[in-house]
Amino acid sequence: MKKLVLTALLALCAVLAFAYEIPKGLLDSQPAQALLINLDQYYAQRALPDKPSIDVDKVYASPRSQVEIRTILKGFTAGPHFHANSDEIVIVVGGSGEILVNGEWKPVKKGDLHINPRGCVHATRALTENMRFLSIYTPQLPQGGDANPVN
């Protein structure tokens, strides 16, 4: 019995050892390296524009997703728009502002999560302070962007 258990454990270890090997050469395996970004350090080093606007830095893109680190500066509104291609997930990581959700302006602050499916109109504004956030798009935005303005 001990020999059978030991053989089974060895077989399981062998399977697990190879389970983490990812085949190279997949059509969408680019980029091939992982990222680790400390947001406090990133924001401390990032120079922002002098006037109200939105600062955008695309830090990751693959055929499956795209990640942007953003700051919307106090006094700026990214007007109502929708994405025809991509869902957008917004994670507020600092400051505060408002996001247009289902036709209503909702206050947001650090720790808030907004999930916006493609085709849904949304907007973002910073009224009293800068708002820092991550935008995650899935799939990635097409060349030239995917923000379709709405009046």
Image: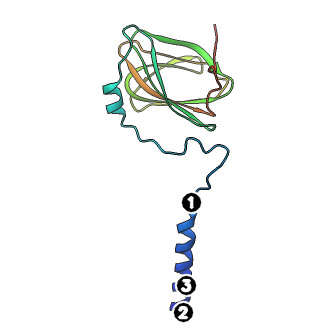
Residue 21: x %, y % from top left: 56, 60
> Which residue type does callout 3 highlight?
Thr
Numbered disc in front, either 2 or 3: 3
Kind of element beneath mark 2: loop
> Which residue type does callout 1 highlight?
Glu
Residue 108: x %, y % from top left: 43, 24
Numbered disc in front, either 1 or 3: 1
As drawn, the residue found furthest toward the front would be 25
- Which label number is shown at residue 29? none
Label 2 Cα neighbours within 10 Å, binned few <14 / some 14-19 / many ≥20 = few
Kind of element beneath mark 1: loop
Tag 1 near tag 3, CB within 8 Å: no
Residue for point 53% across, 68% down:
17
- Which label number is shown at residue 21? 1
Q: Is residue 26 above or below residue 145?
A: below
| Residue that badge 2 annotates | 1
- Which label number is shown at residue 7? 3
**Residue 51 appears in which quarter of the rendering?**
top left
Residue 96: x %, y % from top left: 39, 21
Label 3 Cα neighbours within 10 Å, binned few <14 / some 14-19 / many ≥20 = few
Numbered disc in front, either 1 or 2: 1
Q: Is residue 114 above or below residue 30?
A: above
